[in-house]
């Protein structure tokens, strides 16, 4: 796989993640607004509790997407530096099939996890 292909794949994933992230951030904003409108001064208010839970879930989704975005950006930097596609532990080339599934991975199958 050429570096151009790798960069193109990473950029296309990045665009997907950024679109997802934007949607999730709007969702979080909406929940925050709803919580404000719900006048949830009383923390035992069932609606307030539901909104707090929803906000927590949405916040976790945003955090996951943001982490994925950071991984993709780091991978693009490795493409630019010429170190993309090599395991950070053993230095061996990561198989193309693995990079196809996980383009931002920094490790070979043996050293993953
Ligand atoms: Zn390795």
Image (cartoon, grey):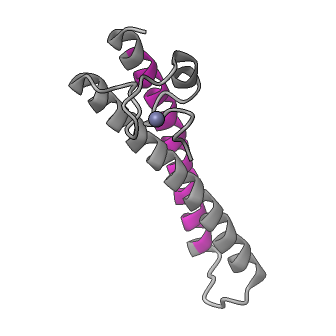
Residue 37 on the magenta span: no
Looking at the image, how many numbered discs can be counted on the residues? Answer: 0
Q: Is residue 105 visible?
A: no
Q: Quadrant of residue 106?
A: top left
Q: Is residue 4 visible?
A: yes
Is 79 drawn above or below residue 1 in the view shown? below
Residue span colored magenta: 8-35
Q: Quadrant of residue 76?
A: top left
Residue 43: image x %, image y %?
66, 89
Is 62 drawn above or below residue 75 in the view shown? below
Residue 46: image x %, image y %?
77, 81
Which residue appears farthest toward the left when viewing the image? Answer: 81
Residue occupying the point 27% across, 31% down: 77
Quarter of the rendering occupied by the N terminus: top left
Q: Is residue 45 left or right of residue 32?
A: right
Residue 86: image x %, image y %?
38, 28
Is 95 drawn above or below residue 57 in the view shown? above
| Closer to us: 60 or 103 | 103
Dominant secondary structure, magenta = helix
């Amino acid at each position: 796989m050429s570096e151009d292909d790798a960069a193109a794949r990473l950029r296309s994933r990045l665009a997907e993640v950024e679109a997802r992230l934007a949607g999730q951030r709007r969702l979080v904003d909406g929940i925050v607004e709803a919580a404000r409108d719900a006048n949830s001064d009383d923390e035992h208010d069932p609606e307030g509790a539901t909104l707090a839970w929803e906000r927590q879930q949405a916040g976790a989704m945003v955090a996951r997407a943001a982490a994925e975005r950071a991984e993709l950006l780091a991978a693009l930097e490795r493409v630019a530096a010429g170190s993309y596609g090599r395991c950070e532990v053993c230095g061996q080339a990561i198989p193309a099939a693995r990079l196809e599934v996980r383009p931002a991975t920094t490790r070979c199958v043996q050293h993953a996890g």
